[in-house]
Amino acid sequence: MLSPGQADELIGRHLTCLPTVSLPLLQCAGAVLREDIHAERDQPPFDRVAMDGIALQSAAVAAGQRHFQIQATQAAGEPALTLASAQHCIEVMTGTPLPVDCDCVVPVEQIGVADGHATLMEGLTVAAGQHLHHRGTDARQGELLLCAGMRLGAPQIAVVAAAGKARVRVASQPMVAVLSTGNELIEPGEPILDHQVRRSNAYAIAAALELHGYPRIATEHLRDDAAELESRLKFHLETHDVLVLSGGVSMGKLDLVPQALESLGVRCVFHKVAQRPGKPLWFGMAPSGAAVLALPGNPVSTAVCVSRYVLPALAAAQGLRCGPVEQISLAEPVTVTVPLTFFLPVQRVTDAHGCCRAMPKRTHGSGDFTSLAATDGFVQLPPGPNTYPAGFVAPLYRW
């Protein structure tokens, strides 16, 4: 069987890169950038006032002048005024251009204003350049601000807007079909018998996708029927970029998913990974270019495989530049008995020294999804048999 790292490599090697689209800036939150963004002009584009107050010449203060005639008010959005003389000052607001022939700002809290004159506080010293945000301090015209492969959050959107771009080239959002299989599954809200279970995996998968920026999701429940499986899988393979299935990929008599996929021409890249939970994971590529990730149906296995494989695969298909996997140390020893990579649900806790650690939260098996509600994700531990001490550092995958 493959190791998780080998599975990662194969998924990355076979994924089809999603196309690039040009979208209005207001539609780009959470999208992955597909172009470099350069500064339209110097930022700030002028010597910018950083405090409400008065603008004046520092040399006049150094020469002993403490009282200044208020010449005018410099308003934001208007060309910079010119100081009439060293005996004058100009009222300014935060964000306005610095008036010509002024070289500093004195905050309003440090002056008194009466009869059209401003008086500096007793003993106040003034230095050239104080309370100014000088032109080009943040970026120079043409400077690279954002690189392709970044996800556009609020700060990045602000940078794009300041660069003057009304539309941006980004990766298109994948169309994902989330399909659950099994005759035993009953929708929430419908009558249920003792021998049946609620259809929960599909809702968890869809929630994980939406929370990570993938809103174009279709869901469907498929019965354990070969003809129905083949028909509906054919439809979704033709209409979606990615299929995420839950259930039907193990070794049981009614685990019909691999056979149905292969009958539709979906090439199996791998089936089974040396891991617990989630060993029966299946990955393949359709002739249409659609990727298929078929996950084991046990809820903990499904949740782990979504965070460990599905979300990274979608990020890679969008061209997202991801940093190293987050690392965290164990809060207490953990014994792994199986010779498989072990995924252990954990809760992030802070110790007495302010360090974040992973507190193990073992489940009662791969069907115990209830226990996951108190966890933040899972750590990936090397195969056993071995005991990993408190302080052992392992990769953390968040839900």
Image: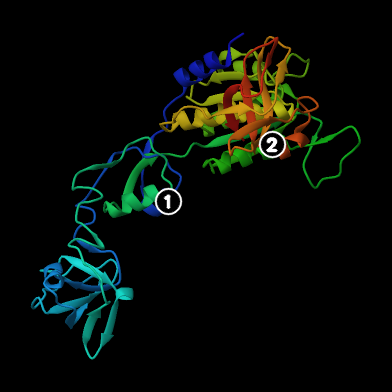
In the image shown, does 340 or 100 lie closer to the viewer? 100
Image location of residue 46, percent across then percent down: 18, 60
The residue that disc 1 covers is: 154
Say left or right for 69 vs 383.
left
The residue at which mark 2 appears reads as 375
Q: Amino acid at mark 2?
A: Thr
Position above or below: 350 against 316: below
- For disc 2, the neighbor class at 10 Å (few under 14, some 14 to 19, many from 20) is some
Identified at 60% across, 27% down, the residue is 329
Q: Residue furthest bottom?
A: 115
Q: Badge 1, how many Cα within 10 Å: few under 14, some, many 20+?
A: few
- Determine the residue located farthest toward the right in the rendered image: 194
Q: Quadrant of residue 360?
A: top right
Q: Position of residue 374 (x, y in %)?
A: 72, 39
Give the residue at x 41% y 44%. Answer: 152
Q: Is residue 234 visible?
A: no
Which quadrant of the rendered structure holds the C terminus? Answer: top right
Percent position of residue 313, x then y:
51, 27
What SS does tag 1 mark?
Answer: helix
Q: Nearer the viewer, residue 98 or 375?
A: 98
Query: Can residue 79 be seen in this snapshot?
Result: yes
The image quarter in which residue 306 lies: top right
- The Cα–Cα distance between marks 2 and 1, rounded to whole angstroms, is 27 Å
Where residue 177 sits: x, y (%)? 59, 34
Label located before the other in sequence (2 or 1): 1
The residue under label 1 is which amino acid type? Answer: Ala
Q: Quadrant of the N terminus?
A: top right
Residue drawn where x is 70% and y is 26% of the image = 332
Residue drawn at x 53%, y 13% is 6
